[in-house]
Image (cartoon, rainbow, N blue to C red):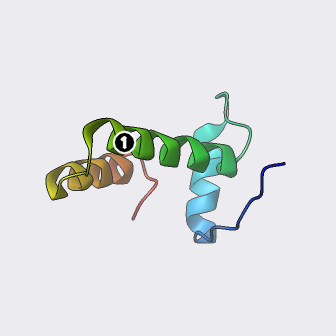
Amino acid sequence: MTEYTTVSIPKGLAERVDETIEGTSFQSTSDLVRFLLRSIVIQHQKEGELTEAEFEEITEQLKSLGYLE
């Protein structure tokens, strides 16, 4: 059985995520967060340690999508 933990995000961001995932295959904010985190971890594992520039690029992409403020 998979164990879970809770991650807190601001309610305003959660509302924006809910609007963003409407009409997509994501069923919830949690689904999207798991997808994003897996993507980052997989990229990290493939390429070794993320450089500061790569981390900044990911951060900027997430900001442009409205997931980070």
Q: Residue 59 in the image: state x and y as whole percent.
A: 31, 55
Q: Quadrant of residue 47?
A: top left
x then y, percent, for residue 2: 78, 50
Name the residue located 33 percent from the left edge and 35 percent from the top edge.
Answer: 46
Quadrant housing residue 28: top right
Between residue 23 and residue 38, name the one nearer to us. 38
For the residue pair 5 and 14, the one nearer the viewer reads as 5
Q: Is residue 42 left or right of residue 28?
A: left
Residues packed near mark 1 inside 10 Å, few (<14), some (14 to 19) or many (20 plus)? few
Farthest residue to the right: give it: 1
Name the amino acid type tagged 1.
Gln
Q: Secondary structure at mark 1?
A: helix
* Residue at figure coordinates x 77%, y 57% from the top left: 3
**In the image, residue 20 above or below residue 5:** above
Residue at horizontal 17 percent and vertical 58 percent from the top: 52
Q: Quadrant of residue 8?
A: bottom right
Q: Could you tell me which residue is drawn at 60 percent across and 47 percent down?
A: 34
In the image, taking residue 50 as reference, residue 65 lies left or right, namely right
Farthest left residue in view:
53
Quarter of the picture holding the C terminus: bottom left
Judge left or right: residue 4 versus residue 57. Answer: right
For disc 1, the marked residue is 45
Count the marks: how many?
A: 1
